[in-house]
Image (cartoon, rainbow, N blue to C red):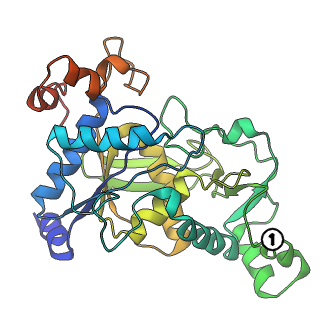
Amino acid sequence: MAEDQARESRGYRGRLAPSPTGLLHLGHAQTFWVAAQRAAQFSGSLILRNEDLDPQRCRLEFVDAMMEDLRWLGISWQEGPDCGGPAGPYTQSERRTFYLAAWRRLRDVGAIYPCTCSRKDVSLAAGAPNDGDDEPLYSGKCRPQKSKTEAAQLRDRGTAEAAVSTQVDEPAGFNWRFRVSDSEEICFIDRHLGPQRIVAGKDFGDFIVWRRDDVPAYQLAVVADDAAMGITEVVRGADLLKSTARQILLYRALGLAIPDFYHCDLVRDDAGVRLAKRHDALSLRKLREAGWTPEQVRSAVPPGGQ
């Protein structure tokens, strides 16, 4: 009860953050409906953000489709690409200055380093990862020998070695990785799943915040956007728990307030596989064409879902 009152006193701000790489499916419906209900429960605001960072996979027609499908489902938002608001723009491809500012801050505090490893390691870094396609544990091949603290001390003394890492003013040309502290435990209380404990260096390694093709990675963009938009609670699927641990480290390094997290149970197909956009038969568009009502879609969430 005290936590609920605290949320209401500071003004609840939730968000919907679909990526226009395909049609929304039944799993998205669960998560986005929970997000809408949470915002309504706390008399808060709901923000729609178009996460269109990946130029190779995002398509304009999916932007229109996702907004139409969300409205059909019965979800409305107070800020977004279609209606504007004080924290815009609400399309990630228009927010590069926010990401560059965050990248420069991480560079200045010695939290990131340039990496020249193969593009296979970074092929998924622009989109939200999950248990099936998460960023592989990094080998450490390009990892600097000095710790972040030692690097910061060198920079403060103005040494030539520090200047090498700080003179780069644009991230393009390298894969920039956030250096984690091996064996550090990232602990947080999930508002749905309870206490969580994820270990850096074991559950995930040094992760990418900017790709060499000059695209900011999902982890950095989401943190920069949620902070700038004043998001107080992030509602998303349970397959992103490790992403939450990464983002908590970024919030700390950037000196930003960390929001609450609510990870929803996943919707799976008959074989127990997490739904993905390739499950076209369970897309909201196909279900609508088959005669489903919004109420039927919402009630199709399996036991244990919200």
Name the outermost residue toward the top. Answer: 271
In the picture, residue 96 is in which quadrant? Answer: bottom right
Disc 1 crowd rating (10 Å Cα; few below 14, some 14-19, many 20+) is some
Which residue is painted at 63% across and 67% down in the image?
103
Q: Amino acid at mark 1?
A: Ser
Total tally of numbered discs in the picture: 1
Say above or below: 123 vs 12.
above
Q: Position of residue 271 (x, y in %)?
A: 36, 11
**Of residues 83 and 284, which is closer to you in this image?**
83
In the picture, residue 281 is in which quadrant? Answer: top left
Q: Position of residue 97 (x, y in %)?
A: 57, 70
**Of residues 172 and 208, which is closer to you in this image?**
172
Q: Which element is circle 1 on? A: helix
Is residue 15 rendered to the left or right of residue 242?
left
Which residue is painted at 83% across and 87% down in the image?
158
Say above or below: 49 vs 268.
below
Which residue is painted at 30% across and 31% down in the image?
27
**Of residues 92 and 255, which is closer to you in this image?**
92
Asked if one can make out residue 185 in the rendered structure from this viewpoint, the answer is no
Disc 1 target residue:
165
Which residue is painted at 18% across and 31% down in the image?
304
Q: Position of residue 30 (x, y in %)?
A: 23, 36
Is residue 74 rendered to the left or right of residue 180?
left
In the picture, residue 265 is in which quadrant? Answer: top left
Instruction: Give the quarter of the figure containing the C terminus.
Output: top left
Instruction: Give the quarter of the figure containing the N terminus.
Output: bottom left
